[in-house]
Image: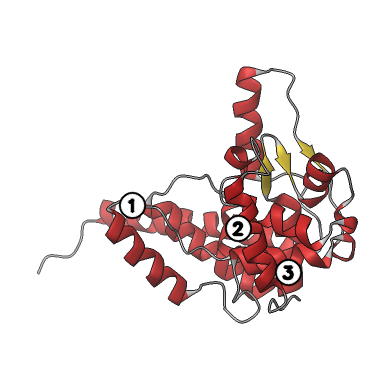
């Protein structure tokens, strides 16, 4: 068997080196954000660019608040609605992923993702909303980094501060003030639950946050919130 040509070896080595450096770049940011609060995420940048195509002077509404200043009701509601195994899993809800696959197969299209809070955070911090296989692989790698380096409290703190809650609206503080005229600290159980059920499609749900569908989902989440364990 003839050995691989030198050019092929060099190409493979260069490719592997670039891949390692690229993952190291992600790792560096994950390490930095363990202590420093992200001022902006990649997803925020993409949304701002889209907004400014229509309105050049558009800005994002986003105010960082520490974990202790976010209502416990919102924390419980988000876990109940988005990831009820958040405290226990290692970044992936394998049972939830299997159920999502089965549901997608029945519908013949992608209607469920089974993503955990950690996975959603990895996507929001660094990636786009595309559903390509490469993006999902990269999301999984970043999720592992986050789970290994951050504790659950930090993961939930950053998630609640960077997740999208409407057109150009990011984080719990901006959402609480937009929809209820209160701070993130002052959210009631019902208000927290209503914000939580908007998360799968915030730009769609913000058009009618008090629809019958969201009412039903809100009270369903409220029933489950007492079982939510928060960090």
The local crowd at label 2, few if under 14, some if 14 to 19, many if 20 or more residues have their Cα within 10 Å, is some
The local crowd at label 1, few if under 14, some if 14 to 19, many if 20 or more residues have their Cα within 10 Å, is few
Could you tell which of marks 1 and 3 lies nearer the N-terminus?
1
In the rendered image, the vertical position of residue 113 relative to residue 132, given as above or below = below
Residue 203 visible in the shown view: yes
In the rendered image, the vertical position of residue 127 relative to residue 139, given as above or below = above
What kind of element bears circle 1?
helix
Toward the viewer: 141 or 153? 153
In the rendered image, the vertical position of residue 52 relative to residue 64, given as above or below = above
Residue 154 position, x and y percent, is 76, 68
The quadrant of the rendering that contains the N terminus is bottom left
Could you tell which of marks 2 and 1 lies nearer the N-terminus?
1
Could you tell which of marks 3 and 2 lies nearer the N-terminus?
3
Which of the two discs, 3 and 2, sits closer to the camera?
Answer: 2
Name the residue tied to disc 3.
Answer: 76
Give the numbered dot on residue 11. Answer: 1
Residue at image x 51%, y 65%? 141
The quadrant of the rendering that contains the C terminus is bottom right
CA distance separating discs 1 and 3? 50 Å
Task: Report the residue that reaches farthest toward the left.
Answer: 1
CA distance separating discs 3 and 2? 15 Å
Name the residue tied to disc 2.
Answer: 217
């Amino acid at each position: 068997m003839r050995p691989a040509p030198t050019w092929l070896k060099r190409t493979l080595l260069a490719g592997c080196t670039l891949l390692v450096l690229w993952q190291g770049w992600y790792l560096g940011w994950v390490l930095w954000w363990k202590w420093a609060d992200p001022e902006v995420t990649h997803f925020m940048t993409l949304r701002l660019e889209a907004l400014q195509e229509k309105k050049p002077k558009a800005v994002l509404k986003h105010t960082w608040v520490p974990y202790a200043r976010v209502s416990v009701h919102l924390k419980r509601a988000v876990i109940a609605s988005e990831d009820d195994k958040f405290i226990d899993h290692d970044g992936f809800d394998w049972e939830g992923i299997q159920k999502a696959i089965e549901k997608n197969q029945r519908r013949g299209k992608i209607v469920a993702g089974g993503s955990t809070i950690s996975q959603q955070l990895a996507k929001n911090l660094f990636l786009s909303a595309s559903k390509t296989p490469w993006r999902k692989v990269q999301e999984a790698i970043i999720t592992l980094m986050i789970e290994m380096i951050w504790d659950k409290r930090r993961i939930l703190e950053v998630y609640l501060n960077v997740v999208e809650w409407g057109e150009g609206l990011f984080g719990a503080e901006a959402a609480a003030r937009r929809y209820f005229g209160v701070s993130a600290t002052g959210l009631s159980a019902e208000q927290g639950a209503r914000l939580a059920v908007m998360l799968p499609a915030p730009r769609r749900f913000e058009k009618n946050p008090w629809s019958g569908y969201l009412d039903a989902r809100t009270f369903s989440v409220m029933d489950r919130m007492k079982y939510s364990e928060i960090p």
